[in-house]
Amino acid sequence: MKKSKGFIVLGSDHAGFRLKEAIKAHLVKKRTNIVDVGVYCEQPADYPDIAKRLVWVMKKKEGNKGMLICGTGTGMCMAANRYKGIRASVAYDIYSAEMARRDNDANVLCLRGRGIDAKKQVKLADIWLNTAFSGIARHSRRIRKLDR
Ligand code: RB5
């Protein structure tokens, strides 16, 4: 039986709301299965609360991936990495987006919602989603050590 690819879970605080909506529209157009855990407007929200919600949903099924957006991506990344099994990474350019998947098998991408062109961020999201983990033994070993 073919293994299902899982869902893309999206979350943001108020500073990332607009970019989350842009990424959501893009993924829906591409018929990607998504779950949006909020926020649903630009009213101030605390990023640790959203990250917690995203992780909870993400862990429901193996293969799910997440995208978290705040002003810089940093707070979301810090929050998500508190949870076992989560490998969250910030990406500000194509190289970091690609390598986060290829070498680190990142399962959560954290993006910057403020002061950056949304189109470039959507492109980073696409690159991240379309890059596979290399599976190289030394990288697998390092990843295993993260959860010990
Ligand atoms: C919210 O103003 C901002 O601090 C937050 O979105 C984020 O950038 C934190 O890392």
Image (cartoon, rainbow, N blue to C red):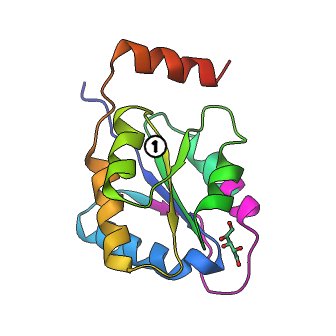
Q: Nearer the viewer, residue 72 or 52?
A: 72
Q: Which residues are magenta?
A: 35-52
Q: Please tell me whether residue 144 is drawn above or below residue 17 in the rendered image.
A: above
- 98 horizontally vs 88: left or right: left
Q: Quadrant of the C terminus?
A: top right
Q: Quadrant of ligand 1?
A: bottom right
Question: Which residue, given by chain and number where applicable, does mark 1 sit on?
Answer: 64
Q: Position of residue 20 (x, y in %)?
A: 48, 73
Image quadrant of residue 75?
A: bottom right
Asked if the magenta segment contains residue 100, the reply would be: no
Tell me if the residue at label 1 has its CB under 8 Å from ligand 1: no
> Circle 1: is it few (<14), some (14-19), or many (20+) Cα within 10 Å?
many
| Residue for point 48% across, 60% down | 35
Asked if the magenta segment contains residue 45, the reply would be: yes
Q: Nearer the viewer, residue 5 or 73?
A: 73
| Residue for point 67% across, 56% down | 51
Q: Position of residue 25 (x, y in %)?
A: 34, 75
Q: Quadrant of the N terminus?
A: top left
Q: Position of residue 136 (x, y in %)?
A: 33, 18
Element under disc 1: loop
Q: Please tell me whether residue 32 is drawn above or below residue 21 in the rendered image.
A: above
Type of residue at label 1? Asn
Q: Please tell me whether residue 42 is drawn above or below residue 74 in the rendered image.
A: below
- 31 horizontally vs 50: left or right: left
Q: Position of residue 74 (x, y in %)?
A: 63, 59
